[in-house]
């Protein structure tokens, strides 16, 4: 008889029959009422085993939207679609639409810039008429953790995907993000044409 000790065992290789994850019960906090909804623990295992952080996860039969919600939580980008209206309606209850608008931009220490008199006067005119025209790039992290900025949306000069003006960034955007419990911390970063970076953090109460 061969002896095997628990502290020396590598364990049992995971098979194709996963019975350690329970299906969603009626009392589960995850339950959304969608007939084919899968538990988050199951999707988390699949996504972790088959993708890396910042990979793109696609689910073209999204159903309850669990794949997208778990992919977002695990730092993956995702694409979701479904032909069924109940799926889209159901998933919308798990998503927040966040509207963000830039209303002003203040250039700090403009007098310190190495400009001649003519260009300094032009800069002062732009600052007075259209200060947002000084922005080269801005981006948004709708779930800022206070340490690492993860851009989920961005616009920059020369980009015509958000509008048809290559010389200005858009002034507002709408972002879809999974609902959160408690407060949501949104971080907006902007870089102006001189390379100066500005950061604004806003804390919102979850609905």
Image (cartoon, grey):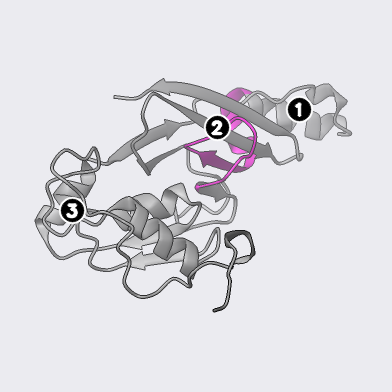
Q: Which numbered dot is residue 121?
A: 1
Res 28 visible:
yes
Q: Residue at x 55, y 58 (%)?
A: 53
Q: Which mark is residue 88?
A: 3
Task: Answer whether residue 188 is magenta in the image.
Answer: no
Of all residues, the one furthest to the front in this rendering is: 1
The residue under label 2 is 187
**Element at label 2:** strand
**Residue drawn at point x = 50 percent, y = 23 percent:** 202
Q: Which of marks 1 and 2 precedes in the sequence?
A: 1
The span from disc 1 to disc 3 (Cα, nearest Å) is 53 Å
Q: Residue at x 16, y 47 (%)?
A: 90
Q: What percent of the width, then of the height, locates residue 97?
A: 32, 38
Callouts 3 and 2 close, C-beta under 8 Å: no
Point out the stretch of residues depicted in magenta: 128-152
Dot 1, crowdedness within 10 Å: few (<14), some or many (≥20)?
A: few
Query: Is residue 103 left or right of 15 when viewed as pictured?
Result: right
Pinpoint residue 122: horizontal percent, then vertical percent: 72, 32
* Location of residue 82 in the rendering, given as x and y in whole percent from the top left corner: 20, 64
**Which of pointers 1 and 3 indicates the residue nearer the eye?**
3
| Mark before the other along the chain sequence, 1 or 3 | 3
Q: Where does residue 94 sit, x and y in percent of width and height?
A: 26, 41
Residue 130 belongs to the span the image colors magenta: yes
Determine the CA span between mark 2 and mark 1: 32 Å
Q: Secondary structure at mark 1?
A: helix
Q: Earlier in the sequence, mark 3 or mark 2?
A: 3
């Amino acid at each position: 008889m061969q002896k095997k000790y628990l502290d020396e065992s590598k364990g049992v290789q995971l098979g194709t029959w996963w019975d350690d994850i329970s299906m969603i019960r009626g009392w589960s906090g995850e339950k959304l009422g969608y007939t084919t909804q899968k538990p988050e623990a199951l999707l988390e295992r699949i996504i972790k085993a088959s993708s890396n952080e910042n990979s793109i996860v696609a689910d073209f039969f999204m159903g309850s939207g669990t794949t997208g919600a778990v992919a977002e939580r695990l730092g993956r980008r995702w694409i979701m679609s479904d032909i069924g209206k109940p799926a889209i309606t159901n998933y919308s209850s798990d998503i927040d639409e966040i509207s963000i608008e830039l209303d002003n931009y203040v250039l700090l220490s403009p007098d310190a810039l190495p400009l001649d008199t003519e260009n300094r006067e032009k800069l002062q005119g732009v600052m007075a008429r259209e200060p947002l025209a000084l922005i080269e790039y801005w981006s948004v992290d709708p779930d800022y953790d206070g340490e690492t900025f993860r851009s989920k949306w961005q616009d920059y000069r020369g980009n015509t995907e958000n509008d048809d003006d290559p010389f200005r960034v858009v002034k507002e955007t709408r972002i879809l993000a999974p609902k959160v419990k408690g407060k949501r911390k949104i971080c907006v970063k902007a870089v102006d044409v001189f390379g100066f970076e500005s950061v604004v953090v806003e804390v919102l109460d979850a609905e």
